Image (cartoon, rainbow, N blue to C red):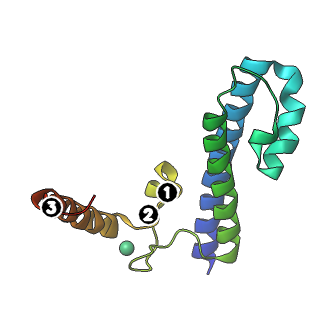
Amino acid sequence: MIKKDERSDRLKEILLNKKGEVEKDIRLHISRQVGPENLHRVDSVMDQGDLSSLDMGEGVDLALLEMRNNTRKAIDSAILRLDEGTYGFCDDCGGDIEEKRLTVMPFAQRCIVCQRKKEEMDKIEREESVKDPDAPV
Ligand SMILES: [Zn+2]
């Protein structure tokens, strides 16, 4: 029990760090493009999750911001799952996903063993679809 709590504490730290990075990135991008005086508008919109409602004029790469904001939302839901005790487990085998792996890829859905197996399978599938030129596109 204690061991599990320690793990989830560490995982939470990883997720919060990532979230901080993404938010910093969003703010940096916006303050560069439209000036720091617009940052307070961004804060409220980020929480609603609809950056396209921001009218910030030219120069703002909305697609990029949406992408970052989606990452941010994904981190939030990962934190929720962590609190529920459903984050950090492999979709395929149900085992713990390695912490090292989650540090690099916080949204990894499989442990390294199952991921490798899946990649093998994907590769075989790709090769088979290449072999069959009549397959519908
Ligand atoms: Zn697994």
Q: Is residue 109 left or right of residue 76?
A: left
Q: Nearer the viewer, residue 37 or 92?
A: 37
Q: Position of residue 16 (x, y in %)?
A: 68, 51
Residue marked by disc 2: 98
**What's the mark number on residue 102?**
1
> Distance of mark 1 from mark 3, alpha carbons?
40 Å
User: What residue is drawn where x is 60% and y is 52%?
Assistant: 14
Q: Position of residue 1 (x, y in %)?
A: 61, 81
User: What residue is drawn where x is 64% and y is 49%?
Assistant: 70
| Residue 74, image quadrant | bottom right
Label 1 secondary element: helix
**What's the mark number on residue 134?**
3
> Distance of mark 2 from mark 3, alpha carbons?
41 Å
Which amino acid type corresponds to the residue marked 2 in the rendered image? Glu
Which amino acid type corresponds to the residue marked 3 in the rendered image? Asp
Which amino acid type corresponds to the residue marked 1 in the rendered image? Leu
Q: Is residue 75 left or right of residue 133?
A: right
Q: Contact (CB < 8 A) between labels 1 and 3?
A: no
Q: Contact (CB < 8 A) between labels 1 and 2?
A: yes
